[in-house]
Image (spheres, rainbow, N blue to C red):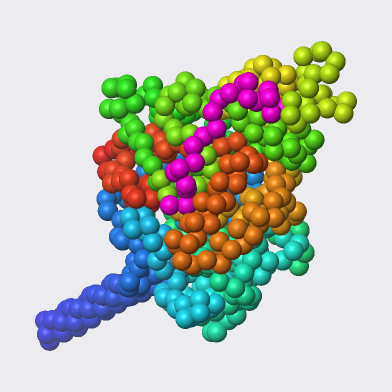
Amino acid sequence: MNGRSGLSVFLLFLLLLVMIVLQILSMVQSDRLYMRLNMLLEQLSNRQISERPHSRSQTPPPNLPMAKYPGDDGDWMVWQLTAEPRTLNPLTVEAETSTRYITTGSIFERILEYDFDEAKLKPWLAESYEVSKDGLEITVKLREGICFSDGVPITADDVIFTYETSMNPGVDAAVQRMAYKNFKKVIKIDDRTIKFIFDEVYWKTFEAVGLFEVLPKHLYKFDNPEEFNKRRSNPVGSGPYIFEKWDVGQQLVLKRNENYWGYKPKIEKIVFKFITNEAAALQALRSGDVDYMIPTSEQYSEMANDKQFNREFLVMRYWAPGVPVFFIAWNEEKPYFKDVRVRLAMTHIIDRKTIAKNLLKGEVEVATGPFYIYGRQNDPNIQPWPYDLQKAAAMLDEAGWIDSDGDGVRDKDGLPFRFKFSYPTGQLLYEQLAKLLKEAGAKVGIDVTPDPYEWSVFVERFQNHQFDALVIGSGGTIEFDPYQYFHSSQIADRGDNVTSYNNPKVDRLLEEARRTLDEDKRYELYHEFHKIIHEEQPFTFLFMRPERRFLDRRFENVKIHKLGLNELDWYVPKAKQRYK
């Protein structure tokens, strides 16, 4: 009895123990299941979160205008610029070459863009376009799914806002308004479709519509135009790079737009270092502080023959449409330069062939006008005026500028022929040119005072026509419309006719050329214009030189296209990357 009772108690205890163990196992399994479920939910949540902002960059829309870039991701490109931009606002007149290097195609994008190999405009932000038979309407359809870097979609409203801002008389955008001079209105068809309507035919209308940098209305809208004019930094566009920071006087940094609507370039950051001294810039390149620079002619000539330098750096030289022409501008508001005979005399005292040979090491062509010397706009039959001090002196005599008091300086009506020659500081070529002009002037009785300015001050004085004479370079377009530099309507409103040149015949030629779509007829008009400009010398055209670049050899896929270099092509193999 007692034995059976003890067995029963033992079996009951065993059963209870088994039940407890099963319960514990059940709880453990439940906890594991709960943990696994939580992990799955967390992974799913993380995946959804990571996909939300980046899904566009991982699966770009079809029919993109750019090819998929080759090579490895990573590294930075450090680009030396001689001049620091005054603004990153692409519409205002203060936007200059350094602004374009930083913003165009990287931060801001355009409706159409030039193909680097074919030199033809093709859709970019636009999916398609249609031109009316009479050429007075162009309808543009934007791509679907394109966004600004903050994720807001680009719509027709942004295009219209950009146009209306450019045309606002309170906005400091005289150059942009000139480009849209024949625009009648821009209207919205739907969220992705815009129609441009024109008052008259203009041969560059298609380019004016295409090379139209679109600003985000939701960020750039303003109540007072001065708000827009004062917006100089923190640019936002739709491009493959976004603004990171601007350390004034030192550098400006762009980082890759990881949510870019198209194929992303491989370089993760572009750093623009502002080094105004030419010797210091080359030293920064050789020490590895800079990867990319535009050398002077003297630097190029010296380094092109340096074998060790060529092992470390690509040394590139090439001609391309849009290379700048350098010139001296004579301000006709000043009493010295109102007379065409004086301006011709000034050209005759400048020995351009010696400048080309000695200062520029033969890396240039002497220019006779504003057009690309290998393009059809340029008249190759026009020959440069010769260096001739005797002829210059005779022209000055004829114009009434003589040394009446024997002090060695010509004068007229009691005014001595003394003027200031302005140029940007930090550029040896301009300093040497100022010295040569002073020496040449003294030989014919003209007192020339070199007048250097820091770049931002120089450009401000240039745009406000506050100078006697100055030297500068200008270029950047496939074919050039000289209207903005030589038509009398472009004198006012800080326009680009900085010399105040006014010739009614030239005005008529430029107006007719703008309306002429037939290329052969248009080139005839420009050749006639070229001849007049050559004879009247509002500018002394100095030279045109090929583009030159030095680049660290760790960069690959570097090609010289018909239109020059496209930095977005480049990459650095992982093993050679310098910045992480």
Closer to us: 347 or 257: 347
Where residue 470 appears, as percent x and y from the top left, is 66, 34
- Is residue 453 among the parts visible in the rendering? no
Quadrant (top left/top right/bottom left/bottom right) for the N terminus: bottom left
**358 magenta-colored:** no
In this rendering, position of residue 419 left or right of residue 57:
right
In this rendering, position of residue 340 left or right of residue 77:
right
Residue 134, relative to residue 425: is it above or below? below
Q: Residue at x 49, y 26 (%)?
A: 353
Closer to us: 492 or 121: 492
Q: Residue at x 54, y 28 (%)?
A: 386
In this rendering, position of residue 72 left or right of residue 346:
left
Where residue 70 appears, as percent x and y from the top left, is 27, 53
Closer to us: 319 or 397: 397
Quadrant (top left/top right/bottom left/bottom right) for the C terminus: top left
Count of numbered circles on the image: 0
**392 magenta-colored:** yes
Start and end of the magenta stretch? 376-396
Closer to us: 458 or 412: 412
Where residue 156 appears, as percent x and y from the top left, is 55, 76
In this rendering, position of residue 555 left or right of residue 146:
left
- Is residue 14 among the parts visible in the rendering? yes
Residue 88, relative to residue 82: is it above or below? below
Where residue 153 appears, as percent x and y from the top left, is 51, 73
- Magenta stretch, overall SS: loop
Q: Residue at x 32, y 73 (%)?
A: 62
Q: Residue at x 60, y 80 (%)?
A: 187
Residue farthest toward the right in the current orientation of the protein: 414
Q: Quadrant of residue 50?
A: bottom left
